[in-house]
Amino acid sequence: EDKNEIVAKRLVVTGSSVQGGYYRSCVLNEASRFRKLVGTMTPPDEESESAEIYVEGKRKNVEGFVRWCKRGKVGLGQESSLTSVEDESPTGLYEEFYITVK
């Protein structure tokens, strides 16, 4: 298993914190600045309190990001749950990590 192979994952995170700007900026920093991943985070669904995160990058960095999301605590009492992780085929369409807003 090549730790530098480019892989992609689609994650769903849930929790009241997912809707907040602080949580979303932590996801942006963790994915792009600290792990050099590209992809996107969708606007949260207010009813289900969930958001989808798509990331691609080196296997070791993607796996580290998934572990970070599983921890569920990002500071300032912000908590979330990682409810699903799916393997995807990398698209190569993203140049950086984007947070999309409604």
Image: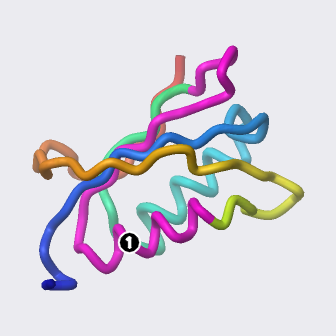
The residue drawn where x is 46% and y is 64% is: 66
In the displayed structure, 38 sits above or below 101; it is below
Amino acid tagged 1: Glu
* Towards the viewer: 85 or 64: 85
In the displayed structure, 14 sits above or below 95; it is above
Question: How far from the left and from the top, in percent, is residue 42?
Answer: 46, 30
The answer to if 84 sits in the magenta stretch is: no
Question: How far from the left and from the top, in percent, is residue 10?
Answer: 35, 45
Q: On the rendered image, what quadrant is the N terminus found in?
A: bottom left
Question: How far from the left and from the top, in percent, is residue 27?
Answer: 56, 54
The residue drawn where x is 20% and y is 48% is: 88
* Towards the viewer: 95 or 4: 4
Applied colour scheme: rainbow
Number of marks in the image? 1
* Residue at far right of view: 77
Question: How far from the left and from the top, in percent, is residue 57?
Answer: 24, 65
The answer to if 60 sits in the magenta stretch is: yes
Side of 69 relative to 90 (left or right): right
Magenta region: which residues?
Answer: 44-70
In the displayed structure, 12 sits above or below 72; it is above
Side of 7 relative to 49 (left or right): left
* Towards the viewer: 61 or 13: 13
In the displayed structure, 36 sits above or below 81; it is below
Which residue is label 1 attached to? 63
- Circle 1 packing at 10 Å, graded few (<14), some (14-19), many (20+), is some
Q: Quadrant of residue 41?
A: top left
Q: Secondary structure at mark 1?
A: helix
